[in-house]
Image (cartoon, rainbow, N blue to C red):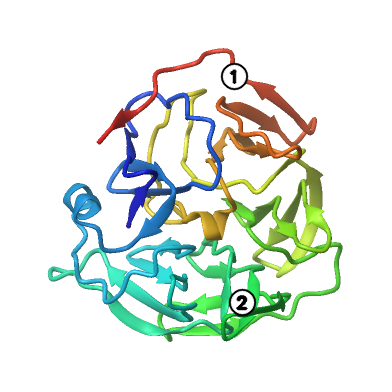
Amino acid sequence: MILYLMQLVFIIHLSSYSPELVGIMHHGTIVFNNEFYQGADVVLSDATFCQHSGLPQTFPRIPGRQTVTAYSHPILLSCGGYDDIGIYDSYFKLDITAQQKSWVQAGTLPQLMTGFAMPTSNNDDIYLFGGSLFDSTTTSGVNEKIYKYNIEMGLWDELSVPQSTWVSRIAIGVLRDDNEIFLMGGHLSNVGDFTTIDVFDTETNTFIGQYNTHRCNVGVVKYFDLVIQDLATLPSSGMPGSPWGGTGFNSIMAFKNGRHFFTPGRVENFSALNFFAEYDPKTDTFTTSEDRLLRPTVR
């Protein structure tokens, strides 16, 4: 799962301070083996990433764009993606605890789609929200169904979710906090960009609230116990990060002190941000970081 941007990959050790990110759009994030990777598209069989992460180079194909990755201990799941040939609905899994690690094709997505979000719940269930549906290589609308992946059975179950204010969309940022999943931003071609945060309760399978972010198309990486601008402990389960197709078009959002987030990203006028901001849902406000720290090492 190498993340690349014009052949450059930013690697941040989680024990160090978080960096000032370059003000770019359309990049992806992934966390694995206590390192955070930031780049553009995500590829699942690159030698450079394998060298740093310890993952095997056995991935059977490289879709190259909008591959969505989720982690439910001990399974790393890679779904979908597209390339110059077409769109893929297959997904692959890797048991990171296995002595002989290899990617294994595990099945197909419930529908042919790209740009969906795949957060992991508090009990390690993997959910699928949103995405752009395709009929062969032609877009055919937006996925309005919500699915939950059964790790043991290897099956996608469609959830029955009551009518709500939730509007399914493409390129959603996702973040988990206990039993709640925060679905942030996204866009629809006929509506435009969304700047809301919808809250989904995984215990009741219902949407229970909504906030306003004033940002759209955001990406997400989740951590525990974050001190301001200091990346700390990597969680043993949950969603460590996703390519830009699954988490929006850019950047990171990080979990801190209940429900606060740090986020460089893209605002509604399509400008790219290169600073960290803290979001407080209690007051629905963003506070820009005062410290502008060193950028990560480029490898």
In the rendered image, the vertical position of residue 3 relative to residue 124, given as above or below: above
| Residue drawn at the location 16% of the way across and 50% of the way down | 51
Say whether residue 256 is left or right of residue 281: left
* Discs 2/1, front: 1
Q: Quadrant of residue 98?
A: bottom left
Q: Quadrant of residue 257?
A: top right
Residue situated furthest top in the rendering = 290
Residue situated furthest left in the rendering = 99
Q: Which residue is mark 1?
A: 289
Q: Secondary structure at mark 1?
A: loop
| Residue drawn at the location 77% of the way across and 38% of the way down | 214
Q: Position of residue 196 (x, y in %)?
A: 78, 48
Mark 2–mark 1 distance (CA, rounded to whole Å): 36 Å
For residue 147, the mark is: 2
Q: Position of residue 11 (x, y in %)?
A: 31, 37
In the rendered image, the vertical position of residue 231 relative to residue 188, given as above or below: above
Q: Nearer the viewer, residue 163 or 267?
A: 267
Q: Position of residue 172 (x, y in %)?
A: 64, 56
